Image: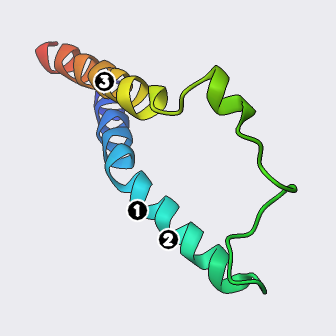
């Protein structure tokens, strides 16, 4: 069981590393597929109201390092077993 969990932890850490590249690729693909030359949007004009309530820097500045640390703690704990 622990070997599978170690493999999963490695996979998820790799996902953190390649995730931004995949997102940029999908953004460029949506620009290519759209008729207007802009990225495809699901709804109308975006509103800046949400940015006043929750600054988007919270996710990359705190969320991503938090989950990377959780994965590393799990990996180190499994390594000590």
Q: Which residue bears the numbered disc 2? A: 25
Q: Position of residue 12 (x, y in %)?
A: 38, 39
Residue in the image at 50% along x and 71% along y: 25
Between the residue at mark 2 and the residue at mark 1, the CA separation in whole angstroms equals: 6 Å
- What is the distance, in whole Å, between disc 2 and disc 3 at their CAs? 34 Å
How packed mark 2 is, by other alpha carbons closer than 10 Å (few <14, some 14-19, many 20 or more), is few
Residue 6 x %, y %: 28, 31
Residue 62 lies in quadrant: top left
**What residue would you read off at disc 3?**
2
**Direction from residue 45 to residue 9 in the image, left or right:** left
Seen in the picture, residue 53 relative to 49 is either above or below; the reply is above
Residue 21 figure quarter: bottom left
Q: Which mark is residue 21?
A: 1
Name the element at disc 1: helix
Q: Which mark is residue 49?
A: none
In this rendering, is residue 12 above or below 66? below
Which one is earlier in the sequence, the residue at label 2 or at label 3? 3
Q: Position of residue 5 (x, y in %)?
A: 35, 29
Disc 2 to disc 1: CB gap under 8 Å: yes
Q: Would you place residue 27 above or below residue 65 in this image?
A: below
- The image shows a total of numbered marks equal to 3
Q: Position of residue 16 (x, y in %)?
A: 37, 44
Question: SS class of the residue under badge 2?
Answer: helix
Residue drawn 64% across the image and 78% down it = 31
């Amino acid at each position: 069981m622990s070997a599978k969990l170690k493999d999963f932890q490695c996979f998820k850490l790799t996902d953190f590393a390649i995730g931004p590249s995949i997102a940029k690729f999908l953004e460029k693909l949506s620009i290519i597929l759209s008729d207007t030359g802009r990225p495809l949007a699901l709804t109308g004009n975006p509103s800046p109201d949400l940015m006043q309530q929750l600054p988007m820097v919270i996710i990359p500045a705190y969320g991503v390092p938090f989950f990377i640390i959780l994965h590393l703690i799990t990996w180190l704990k499994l390594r000590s077993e």
